[in-house]
Image (cartoon, rainbow, N blue to C red):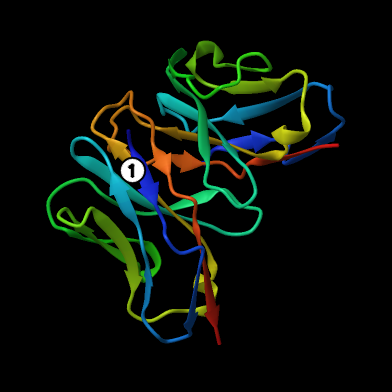
Amino acid sequence: AQSVAQPEDQVNVAEGNPLTVKCTYSVSGNPYLFWYVQYPNRGLQFLLKYITGDNLVKGSYGFEAEFNKSQTSFHLKKPSALVSDSALYFCAVRVHSSASKIIFGSGTRLSIRP
Amino acid sequence: EAGVAQSPRYKIIEKRQSVAFWCNPISGHATLYWYQQILGQGPKLLIQFQNNGVVDDSQLPKDRFSAERLKGVDSTLKIQPAKLEDSAVYLCASGRLAAADTQYFGPGTRLTVL
């Protein structure tokens, strides 16, 4: 069965410092991996996805994520955090089938202090 | 292009009452998803449509929840009768056919059952 784990409920970072939000996954087969961000009272906004090819994926708002097949991880990173990055971040996984469901992690709240 | 539209944005009902939510996906998107997001958790898929057919409804509580997507465009999700534990945000998302395609989310409907 597919699963996604976000081991940290909350990540606190000072503005200007690099940030990492962790995600590990478990699927049978090759995964598609996604990161979404959710601001208060808003739906989820797409940040980036890994489909195939280059393990380093660049996305919106300066975020990037690295696919690591051996460690089954897809950590979200940003070199320099902004206060406006404070939000709830969700990692998600899907296997290669249009009939498959996308499974979301439980979310990590990112808090950037000025 | 216009995003995914949902209404209402907020709904408060008493237990055992009925409620319906509406979703209008992005034009041309064949797949439509309804998710339930309970506070502090990641979204959980309730039902997935491909055009006007159901692809996955394995996590839909069919004794009280129903959904339809007439003509393969708009969709409605109904709860009848509502329970206290149905209090959550109901998110609609749409996407193209391939599993690698991004899902785009609406703003959600926040349901409170008293």
The reply to whether residue A79 is in sight is: yes
Q: Residue furthest left?
A: A53
Q: Position of residue B89 (x, y in %)?
A: 65, 41
Q: Is residue A5 above or below residue A102?
A: below
Determine which residue is flagged by label 1: A93
In the rendered image, residue B107, in percent from the top left (x then y), is placed at: 61, 45
- What residue sits 13% from the left and 57% below the top? A54
User: Left or right: where does residue A43 sit relative to residue B81?
Assistant: left
Q: Mark 1 is on which residue type? A: Val
User: In the rendering, at what x and y percent does residue B83 appear?
Assistant: 77, 28
**In this rendering, position of residue B66 left or right of residue A105:** right
Q: Can residue B1 be seen from the camera position used here?
A: no
* Vertical order, A8 against B1 (above or below): below
- Assess disc 1: are there few (<14), some (14-19) or many (≥20) residues with their C-alpha within 10 Å of its C-alpha: many
Left or right: A73 as drawn, with respect to A10: left
**In which quarter of the view is residue B101 placed?**
top left
- The residue shown at (26%, 43%) is A32
Please state the horizontal and vertical placement of residue B71, each as a whole percent of the image.
51, 12
What residue is rendered at 39% in x and 52% in y? A5
